Amino acid sequence: MNKPQEVLILTGMSGAGRSTVAHALEDLGWYVVDNLPASLLPALVAQTDGAKIPSMAVVVDVRSGQFFDDLNSSLQALSLNKAAHRLLFLDATDQALVQRFESTRRPHPLQGSDRIVDGIARERTRLEDLRSRADVVIDTSNLNVHQLEKRVGEIFAAGQSRGVRVNVLSFGYKYGIPVDADLLLDCRFIPNPHWVPNLRPLTGLSEEVSEHVLSSPGVGEFVDSYVSLIHQMAEGYLREGKTYVTLAVGCTGGKHRSVAISEAIAARLNAVEGKVVIEAYARHRDVGRE
């Protein structure tokens, strides 16, 4: 029996990196269709289903006009036809988007005679409901081209095992909650190594800080309980077709506690066997910002 075709709809904010992601998918062996009118999406999927195109990505964005209404109705048609598909939404902060448009000296597609920020605001409002429906959201604000390509490879590499990939992302609340978080874990209840003079200059990647954090009362049991919870949730995620999850782990500055806890959770997720294969990796958004 042939493997069902995998269809990925790639969309999101203008300037958030759609071209980079499209090229990365092509390098991974995906068949990519760029700037397709949203109304043609169901017909394209029906035409290519069963053909020798196992993985197809379709880029749909505001350039095609009538974006919001047409894409939503097309996604509904795919669901009614039971065509397997996922929606990838690329996002970034307004500041990052403005900087990118200014660096390329190109106007925002919805800017008109107004400012870049006005075009961004219009697009964000227009895509608000669509973003909430996305299967995968990638925040590209702090990613360069090579980092974004690597992230795409981790999520959408051809031949990946049928399991769930967990991105355990440490962050500091003082710098804001990651916009692409599926799950949020607050570890500010743990004693802060910042107040230990010999640990303050170190990060949670150091053995000394890690031992200090993980040896605090109840922390080891807390990590084990959360790892067990993720394994239970993974079965439901897989049934719903969600194969990529971002777990954001936060502390005050994103330097000590969240980093150590993220590393511990990722390591234990990879070590503990469950009914669903889980591949976890830790990332640290705010290490080095202080």
Image: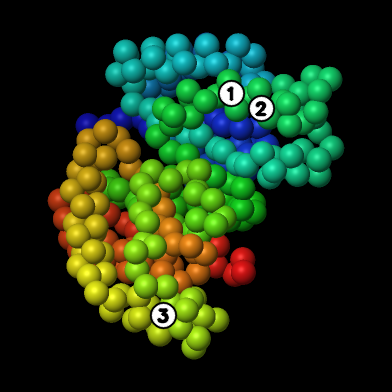
Placement of the N terminus among the 4 image quadrants = top left
The residue sitting at 66% across, 39% down in the picture is 94
Q: Where on the picture, by quarter, is residue 146? A: bottom right
Instruction: Name which residue type carries label 2.
Output: Ala
How far apart are the two marked residues, 1 and 3, measured between alpha carbons? Answer: 43 Å
First-in-chain label (1 vs 3): 1
| Disc 2 target residue | 121
Identify the residue position indicated by label 3 in the image.
Answer: 209
Residue 125: image tag: 1
> Is 92 left, or right, of 165 in this rendering?
right
Element under label 3? helix
Give the residue type at disc 3.
Answer: Val
Relative placement, left or right, of 97 versus 214 is right
Residues packed near mark 2 inside 10 Å, few (<14), some (14 to 19) or many (20 plus): few
**Cβ–Cβ below 8 Å for labels 2 and 1?**
yes
| Percent coordinates x, y for residue 57 in the rendering | 49, 32
Give the x, y percent position of residue 20: 62, 43
Name the residue: 32% across, 13% down: 80
Q: Looking at the image, which residue sits at the far left? A: 275
Q: Position of residue 213 (x, y in %)?
A: 35, 75
Looking at the picture, does residue 87 appear above or below residue 187? above
Looking at this view, is 166 or 228 the one in front?
228
Residue 136, placed above or below residue 257: above
On the question of residue 71 being in view, the answer is: yes
The answer to whether residue 56 shows anywhere in this view is no
Q: Callout 1, which amino acid?
A: Thr
Which SS class for mark 2?
A: helix
- Residue at the image position 37 percent from the left and 56 percent from the top: 186
Kindly report the distance in space between the C-alpha atoms of the residues bearing marks 2 and 1. 6 Å
